[in-house]
Amino acid sequence: MKQWYELLFENYGRKYDQEPFTQGTLGECDFIEQEISRDKSLKIIDIGCGTGRHSIELAKRGYRVTGVDLSEAQLRRAREKTKKLDLNIDFQKQDARNLPFEGEFDLAIMLCEGGFPLMETDEMNFEILKNATKALKEKGKLMFTTLNGLFPLFHSVKEFYESAANKEGNAAYENCSFDLMTFRDHSTVVFEDDAGTKKELTCNERYYVPSEIAWLLKTLGYRKIEILGAKLGAYSRQDKLTTEDFEMLVVAEK
């Protein structure tokens, strides 16, 4: 049986590209470039690349990018956009829990919850971090965003989703309930796919507190781990993580 995150992206590429949370690509890629000192010789893997927005922007800027995703429909959209722009990006259908790469990339990015932390168990989420790490070279860097577990301790996730839905997004979240024992948010997402069909899916996402992320990455051998606030389209090292941040940005070096 397909999971909600597989069903969500079956025919949702065009609408996905119009969602408010996908509009920060340029600023996010500016930050990525700063982090790798604009070194065009580096190889980048975009895990959970979706419709390829970060992959495409980085390729436009002259980087060699491989994009992987579980959704064939999202990859189809990514390839369409890439072809129009006459870019060369290697898009592959892969499961982030079982990637075939070993020591190939200088940088792995997983932005906007591309895979981690959508999995149904903590073990599966950890497999994604493990596979991303395995794909990196000896001195590689991992950069990803994830849901900030400090946020629901001080704010209502339900209210946050309601305010986000009022910003002209297509997807709306209903019946939100946050479980303090598992740090999982259970909700129903209601949206229209690219064909105009209304769909309703039951979602289950894991929020992480910074100390958990630090511990998981330490067990994978990262020597430098930094956890920052993640402002849409405006990632910055000056942005210290607070309880106001819905997402956190993690930058880790092996």
Image (cartoon, helix red, strand yellow):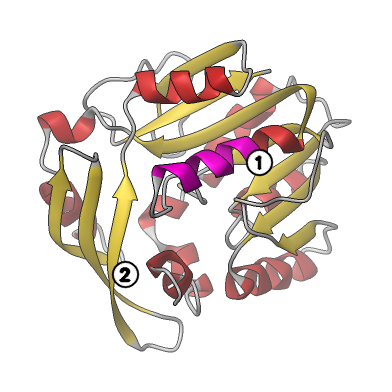
Based on the picture, tell me whether residue 129 belongs to the magenta stretch: yes
Q: Position of residue 111 (x, y in %)?
A: 52, 43
Given the current orientation, which residue lies at the most extreme top position?
223
At label 2, the amino acid type is Asn
Density class for disc 2 (Cα within 10 Å; few <14, some 14-19, many ≥20) is some
Above-or-below relation of 194 to 235: below
Locate residue 56 relative to residue 101 in the image: left or right.
Answer: left
**SS type, badge 2:** loop
Determine the CA span between mark 2 and mark 1. Answer: 32 Å
Look at discs 2 and 1 and give the one toward the viewer. 1
Which percent across, then down, holds residue 173? 21, 62
Q: Position of residue 162 (x, y in %)?
A: 15, 56
Q: Residue at x 58, y 53 (%)?
A: 48
Q: Is residue 36 above or below residue 24?
A: above
Q: Which residue is mark 1?
A: 131
Residue on which the image places disc 2? 170
Image quadrant containing the N terminus: bottom left
Q: Residue at x 76, y 39 (%)?
A: 44
Residue span colored magenta: 122-130
Specify whether 234 is left or right of 198: right
Q: In the image, what residue type sits under mark 1?
A: Asn
**Occupied quadrant, residue 18:** bottom left
Q: Do we see residue 144 in this rendering? A: yes
Q: 169 above or below 67?
A: below
Query: Where does the C terminus fall, quadrant-wise?
Result: top right
- Residue at figure coordinates x 57%, y 44% from the top left: 128
**Count of numbered tags:** 2
**Depth check, front residue: 29 or 99:** 99
Predominant secondary structure in magenta? Answer: helix
Is 139 left, or right, of 88 in this rendering?
A: left
Asked if residue 147 lies in the magenta stretch, the reply is no
- SS class, disc 1: helix
